[in-house]
Amino acid sequence: MELGIKYLNTTPIRYANIAHTPVFHSVWTSENALEDARAFITRIESLRKEKDGDEEALERESRREIEAVIQWCRDKFGEDEMKDATKEWVQPRKDIRDIGEKMITGGEGWRILATQSATLTNHEVLSHLLTLRTRTQCHPPKSPNYESVIRDVTTHLSPSPPNTLRPRPPPSYLPTSPPSHETLLATLLTTLIASLKPYNLLKTEVLQIANLAPESTAQLVPIVEELEMRYSDEEQEGILGVVRGVFGLGEGVNREGENGEGGMLEEEEGGGGGGGGGGN
């Protein structure tokens, strides 16, 4: 129940997707009210179609539905527990239209509670965009620029890791199926961060390594500040070995070397044993 209160306190709900969220199930199914919840979703979907373009009706119906959710929570959780939640969640009347518009037209309706509180890798941004695209297929946003922006950013990030010196096809570690790629990305990034921890890299350096997936010392130099002063040749190869192991780049490095396209890598591998080990 506390999870539901916290959710209402921080996030204006996107009704269209509420049935698919863990918070939704933790609140509604605990009260054996799943059927009522499904009916609620159906009603909101109908409102979205009926009130499109009618701002006054949209404001009125949005306010009614918002208050209905709050009243339901008040009945279930009690007045005292709801007092703090509703105080911050319910906006002044002048903001009701904006909130309702975001919810009923399919906008995410999120509030930014703290800016610059976290840094995302390119992979996480791509994962979010792929998930967002599946969520908005049924109710495409009205903004004419929305699709073009999403398409351009997704295209830029898709040959991930992006912006490497040699282009590669989309990686096999990033499946296009939304239910699986978020979990896989979390595992990969957690593994990468844990494996790089002994090298005491800066947070920004780890972020750039995750974004660019360097395959050679030459690609590592602009990422890690004072690379040669801070790390020996063996440690540099160790960092590259971690990247190759996590992102599965070893096989591609060998293929490029065999095709004569990886000259820089071939020179490095010829100069030390660490490079050869990374290709296995």
Image (cartoon, rainbow, N blue to C red):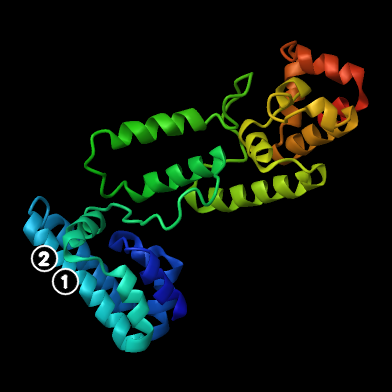
- Which amino acid lies under the numbered mark 2 shown in the image of this protein? Arg
Residue 8's x, y, as percent? 36, 70
Q: Residues within 10 Å of mark 1 (few under 14, many from 20)?
A: few
Hey, which quadrant is residue 245 in on the image? top right
In front here: 23 or 95? 95
Q: Up-down: is 59 above or below 220?
A: below
Classify mark 2: helix, strand or loop. Answer: helix
For residue 199, side relative to residue 59 (left or right) = right
Whether residue 157 appears in this view of the structure is yes
Residue 235's x, y, as percent? 86, 34
Residue 119's x, y, as percent? 55, 45
- Which amino acid lies under the numbered mark 1 shown in the image of this protein? Arg
In front here: 119 or 179? 119
Residue 226's x, y, as percent? 77, 27
Classify mark 1: helix, strand or loop. Answer: helix
The quadrant of the picture occupied by the C terminus is top right
Q: Residue at x 32, y 48 (%)?
A: 136
Hey, which quadrant is residue 110 in on the image? bottom left
In front here: 29 or 102? 102
For disc 1, the marked residue is 64
Hey, which quadrant is residue 109 in on the image? bottom left
The quadrant of the picture occupied by the N terminus is bottom left
For disc 2, the marked residue is 60
Which label number is shown at residue 102? Answer: none
For residue 216, side relative to residue 185 (left or right) = right
